[in-house]
Amino acid sequence: MTSLLGLNVGDGNTDMYIIGLQEVNSMINKRLKDVLFTDQWSEVCMERLSPFGYVLVTSQRMQGLLLLVFAKYFHLPFLRGVQTETTRTGLGGYWGNKGGVSARMSVFGHTICFLNCHLPAHMENSDQRMEDFESILQQQQFEGQTATGVLDHDLVFWFGDLNFRIDDLDMQVVKSAIDNNKFSILWEKDQLNMAKDNETVLEGFQEGPLKFPPTYKFDIGTNTYDTSGKKRKPAWTDRILWCLRATAPPSVSAGKPGSVSGLTSGTKVTQHGYRSHMEYTVSDHKPVSSIFTLQFQYKVDIPLVTIIVADEWNSIADATAKFKLAPNYSRSSWDWIGLYKVGFKHHKDYVGYVWAKQEEADFLRQEHEVIFTEEELPKGSGDFILGYYSNNMSSIVGVTEPFQIQLPTSDLNTSSSDSSDFSSEDDSTVHMKTRARTPSPHKGKNHKHHSHSHSRSSSPAQANIKELSATAASLSNTIAGERAFIGQPAEGSSKACGSGKKDENVEDSSM
């Protein structure tokens, strides 16, 4: 996973990872274990990503389908209105072996939806695949006045085992084209490419060039296409597409590396790579991944809660923090502030917490204070951050930069996490050592992006343009028969998403 996600070769500036899996082991005994404990795929992804500062924003599981969204911790206050949906299409909608899982959110004020699908198999079911896709789009509805459907979002990423095949051409022609790297011969007969010309719902969806061999079907443990009795014809079943909602006439930027598309409203998507990973042989599919950059104007650039904390806590008496609330923040008496070790996995992976109590006199105060007791503090030293958890929004809406705790104790064992839904954090090496008191909003700069690099975007304050980098991929069946995906974009001219509403209203900062 470390290699597949590029954690050992990247520059560390990727902002988000979106990971989709299909055919995760969903046997009854395995599902019962996953109900009681975190599923193994979520655990391994958190274990690999958390040491680099990535926190699990949300996840959605439906039998064999799993979607995971990770982001750098300092972006959490600007990822709002997070919701997930599932749609079953197997056995006429009664079984979740096929269907779609999605996660939507407002990212710095721009609505984005990630949709991970596993569509029907077999050559002859191309029409059924399109019907199921349309059914998923119709059934998935989110709460709120804007972006209620998948295609109502400013940006949609659609990925997974879409199961489209190569029509007409016989096995020998397909294999000859693959052996000679003449993939263009196969593009014209790819069912998904052909559907784009005829299906209204696909209008505006874009995909990067398929410059890698078909990702299905291989003999497990090899790079040899299917030699079983079924002899499945190779196909690009595992795909990553994206779609910008039209709010203005499209404009395509020229002279930039990668695939670039955008809208005159200022949103721009740049794809830096679209590839398969042939080195993985534990599946009959090959993983697919892509890297892209989003560039847009800030619509939300002020956190709902600002936390003020000292550079160091050297004694129990230092363990205090102050916080300020934005005027449009809807506070709950169940809000709390968590103390997290740098490298935490998710919002419940705290060392300790205190309630952000709301007294009657608080309504007139501009600044509030909380005090951590000795029981809530770690035993020993380390780098930590504070995060304000909103009960109404079910997410962290304010964070600090890392600060150091050095309490007078010889016990070096950090207090265990109080998490009930996830396992406690490990003490992997962490790569964040900054000391600024707020999430360095003035430090972010836009950088040119190379093939696999991304610009780090610290929490925005004064910047007018934001570049958001993400890695998306599509894994495939592993030892346990599990397939994964990490969603991503594509290239082509920018068009409106098929049948999406042309509502130009965008969610405000109160989400």
Image (tube, rainbow, N blue to C red):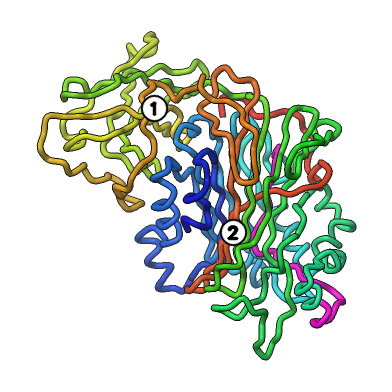
Chain-order first, disc 1 or disc 2: 1
The secondary element bearing badge 2 is classed as: strand
At 40% from the left edge and 56% from the top edge, which residue is drawn? 43
Q: Which mark is residue 485?
A: 2
Tell me if 224 is positioned left or right of 349 in this view.
right
Determine the secondary structure under disc 1: loop
Position of residue 255 measured from the top left corner of the image (x, y, whole percent) = 80, 36
C-alpha span from label 1 to label 2: 31 Å
- The answer, for residue 111, to whether it is visible in the render is no
Compare residues 246 and 146 and report the one nearer the observer.
Answer: 246
Residue 297: in sight, yes or no?
Answer: yes
Q: Nearer the viewer, residue 431 or 105?
A: 431
**In the drawing, what numbered circle is on residue 401?**
1
Q: Residue at x 54, y 25 (%)?
A: 444
Q: Quadrant of residue 162?
A: bottom right
Side of 439 where 123 appears, left or right = right
- Residue 322's spot in the image, x, y percent? 33, 18
